[in-house]
Amino acid sequence: MSAFNRILLCYDGTREGQHALADGARLARELAAQVHVLSVINNSTWVQGADITSAIPANLVSDSVKSVLDEGLKKLAATGIHATGHFAIGDPLDQIPHFAKELNVDLIVVGHHKAGRLARWWGGRTDGLLLDRVSCSVLVTMGPEIESREEQAENAEHAESGAAGPRVEHS
């Protein structure tokens, strides 16, 4: 019997979320595991800067999350995987551990979004926070590396300036 019997796939509709869904589905199929899909809309982005939350009807927000969740469930169903869907509004770093505990999952599958240098500088380091909040294994999936817009702009600027030689990046 597998060590991973109950898997929580975190899906938000992004490219990274799609990779997590696909990789988690393959693993769940191989292990014959029970699958749960969680979609979380982060409400902290609404609060920053202005009181927009009062202007957005709650049912519109939940409909948005539900549509992302339904999309993920349909993708899994198309591959022959039956999954139970869950949605939440709040901070994913709070919601994912909450659902993992409530559902008693053995494995959480999340997609990794590579942050640019500026995002890491201004946003602070949050690496490991999810790992510190759960008591099960976490699989972080990595999709194919695609150059971010920030990196594309930097490369274009670098090419226009005619600078030669290798670029050195500091993290």
Image: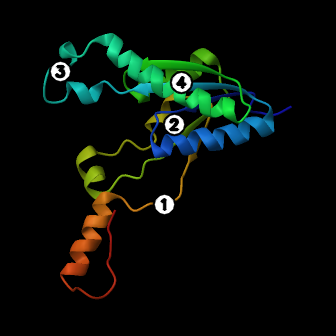
Q: Residues within 10 Å of mark 3 (few under 14, many from 20)?
A: few
Front: mark 2 or 4: 4
Residue linked to disc 1: 145
Q: Nearer the viewer, residue 117 or 128?
A: 117
| Residues at discs 1 and 2 in contact (Cβ within 8 Å) | no
Residue corresponding to mark 2: 131
Q: Earlier in the sequence, mark 1 or mark 2?
A: 2
Looking at the image, which residue is at 25% across and 68% down? 154
Q: Residue furthest left?
A: 50
> Residue 65's x, y, as percent?
42, 23
**Circle count:** 4
User: Residue 121: image x %, image y %?
Assistant: 25, 52
Which three-letter amino acid code belongs to the residue tagged 4? Answer: Asp
Q: Which image quadrant: the C terminus?
A: bottom left
Chosen colour scheme: rainbow
Read off the residue under disc 3.
52
Of the image marks 4 and 3, the number of the one nearer the N terminus? 3
- Side (left or right) of 130 relative to 76: left
Residue at 49% across, 45% down: 16
Asked if the residue under mark 3 is in contact with the one under mark 4, i.e. CB atoms within 8 Å, the reply is no
Report the disc number at residue 70: 4
Disc 1 to disc 2, C-alpha distance? 23 Å
Locate residue 152 relative to residue 95 in the image: left or right.
left
Q: CA distance from mark 4 to mark 1?
A: 27 Å
Cβ atoms at labels 2 and 4 below 8 Å apart: no
Q: Is residue 107 shown to the viewer in this render? A: no
Amino acid beneath label 1: Glu
Mark 3 residue element: loop
Q: Is residue 48 above or below residue 125?
A: above
